[in-house]
Image (cartoon, rainbow, N blue to C red):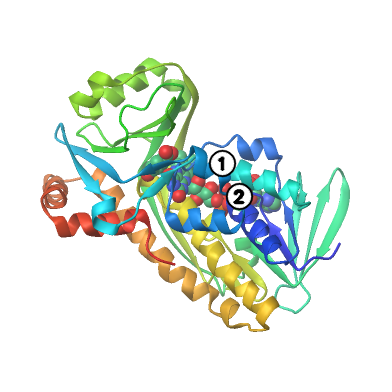
């Protein structure tokens, strides 16, 4: 099989790239290790920056998001049993859209299928060859049959545990990592959200987040030790813990119910440099991870796709390699800013096991500064809604 761009990974990054390329008349093949249902079963991000919303429009897959997504003009930060609001609209003139990653991915799969896109599911042993030459190719196996895709370029969109990043030699690749000493226990429940906006809560018992997917589907998280397992947490125990961590006013109106999903995610900051090696380009979680506190994971994946898509369009439509040549440095410049913001929000809102009394005072002072300073709120709003591409 021959294509222009071989895309490894059929998560949001790979599918978005594939659909955008299709719109521009550039051919691609997506190789996904799992099934469509498996990919759609992962409950992940919920907050979309306007950059990603714009890319969904450009890809021609925005109808459902525009009909069903929720515009959020602000968010609440809670500490010491009170909450203050960061007003995105006032400080940035824009907003974020609440629409689940599952729905984004479903819309992209539907569009790829409707337009005859080539997606190979259950692709095992995907291996990248000769990316340091002008004739790269990918080999794989499906249903016991070996396959090969010859291409001009390879997009490594295969997430943190994929093969693409490992293909770049150790002598070239530099990795930066910070692992946080806690995780997030998250549940999804068919209950109305406790508030119209998200509540990020700093409490002496640890961080909590009240989020949502729609008017009757809520997503809540509490910080937990990494040694905990979801089975250890009954629904009742989860709700009790959440209520203790959010302001009383919110706890009193919280509607509880059975969880329909419960999982624990570890928190990590990670960046690999460079994001290009020869004809291989890394995108999304394959190249970087942020702790979920700033809601930046899917959104940084989207900005990578924007830079790579523009670069590939320059290459195929304008015969210029300037865009792909600058891909890594352009993408990394924005990623490091999102890494900084996610690390800052994580540090501001969580309890760390080794936190000293001085560290706690610093956290309280930082929260008070954010509550009282318009300038600090503007800086937070600017980062939260997403820095420009
Ligand atoms: P994905 O989604 O991991 O997709 C990679 C795909 O590649 C496949 N794959 C392979 N395919 C072929 N061969 C191989 N060898 C392969 N290895 C892997 C995998 O099966 C998979 O389908 O990466 P992608 O596309 O880069 O997308 C990144 C996002 O999924 C991720 O950044 C976000 O979910 C992070 N995230 C959030 N991001 C936000 O922007 N806003 C949020 O509110 C937000 N909340 C979250 C989150 C992530 C969370 N978890 C569980 C990590 C909340 C949570 C709890
Ligand atoms: C979510 O709804 O899953 C969510 C929202 C905001 C975050 C992280 C996760 O910062």
Could one spot residue 127 in this view of the protein?
yes
- Name above or below for residue 118 compared with residue 143: below
- Which residue bears the numbered disc 1? 64
User: Is the residue under label 2 in contact with that under label 1 (CB below 8 Å)?
Assistant: yes
252 left or right of 15 in image: left
259 left or right of 161 in image: left
Q: Quadrant of the C terminus?
A: bottom left
**Image spot of residue 240 (x, y percent):** 30, 19
- Which residue bears the numbered disc 2? 61
Residue 113's disc number: none
> Which of these two is toward me, 170 or 287?
287
**Image spot of residue 20 (x, y percent):** 64, 60
Q: Secondary structure at mark 2?
A: loop
Residue at 56% across / 40% down in the picture? Answer: 103
Separation (CA) of disc 1 from disc 2: 8 Å
Q: Quadrant of the N terminus?
A: bottom right
């Amino acid at each position: 099989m021959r294509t222009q761009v071989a895309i490894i990974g059929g998560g949001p990054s790979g599918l978005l790239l594939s659909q955008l390329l299709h719109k521009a008349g550039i051919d691609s093949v997506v190789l996904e290790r799992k099934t469509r249902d498996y990919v759609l079963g992962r409950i992940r991000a919920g907050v979309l920056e306007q950059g990603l919303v714009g890319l969904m429009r450009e890809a021609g897959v925005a109808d459902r998001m525009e009909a069903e997504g929720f515009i959020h003009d602000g968010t609440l930060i809670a500490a010491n049993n009170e909450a203050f609001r960061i007003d995105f609209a006032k400080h940035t003139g824009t907003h974020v859209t609440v629409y689940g990653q599952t729905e984004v991915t479903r819309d992209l799969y539907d569009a790829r299928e409707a337009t005859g896109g080539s997606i190979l599911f259950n692709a095992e042993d995907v291996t990248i060859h000769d990316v340091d030459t002008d004739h790269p190719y990918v080999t794989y196996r499906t249903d016991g049959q070996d396959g090969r895709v010859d291409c001009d370029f390879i997009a490594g969109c295969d997430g943190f545990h994929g093969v693409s990043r490992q293909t770049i030699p150790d002598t070239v690749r530099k990795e930066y990592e910070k692992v946080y000493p806690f995780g997030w226990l998250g549940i999804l429940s068919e209950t109305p959200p406790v508030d119209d906006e998200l509540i990020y809560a700093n409490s002496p018992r640890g961080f909590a987040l009240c989020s949502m997917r729609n008017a009757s589907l809520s997503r809540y998280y509490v910080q937990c030790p990494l040694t905990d397992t979801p089975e250890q947490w009954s629904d009742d125990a989860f709700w009790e813990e959440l209520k203790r961590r959010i302001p009383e006013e919110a706890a009193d109106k919280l509607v509880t119910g059975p969880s329909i999903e419960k999982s624990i995610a570890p928190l990590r900051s990670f960046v690999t440099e460079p994001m290009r090696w020869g004809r291989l380009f890394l995108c999304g979680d394959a190249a970087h991870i942020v702790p979920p506190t700033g809601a930046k994971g899917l959104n940084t994946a989207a900005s990578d796709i924007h830079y790579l898509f523009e670069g590939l369009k320059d290459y195929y439509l304008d015969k210029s390699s300037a865009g792909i040549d600058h891909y890594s440095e352009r993408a990394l410049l924005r990623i490091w800013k999102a890494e900084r913001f996610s690390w800052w929000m994580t540090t501001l809102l969580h309890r760390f096991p080794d936190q000293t009394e001085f560290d706690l005072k610093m956290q309280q002072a930082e929260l008070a500064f954010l509550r009282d300073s318009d300038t600090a709120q503007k800086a937070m709003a600017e980062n939260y809604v997403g820095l420009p591409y």
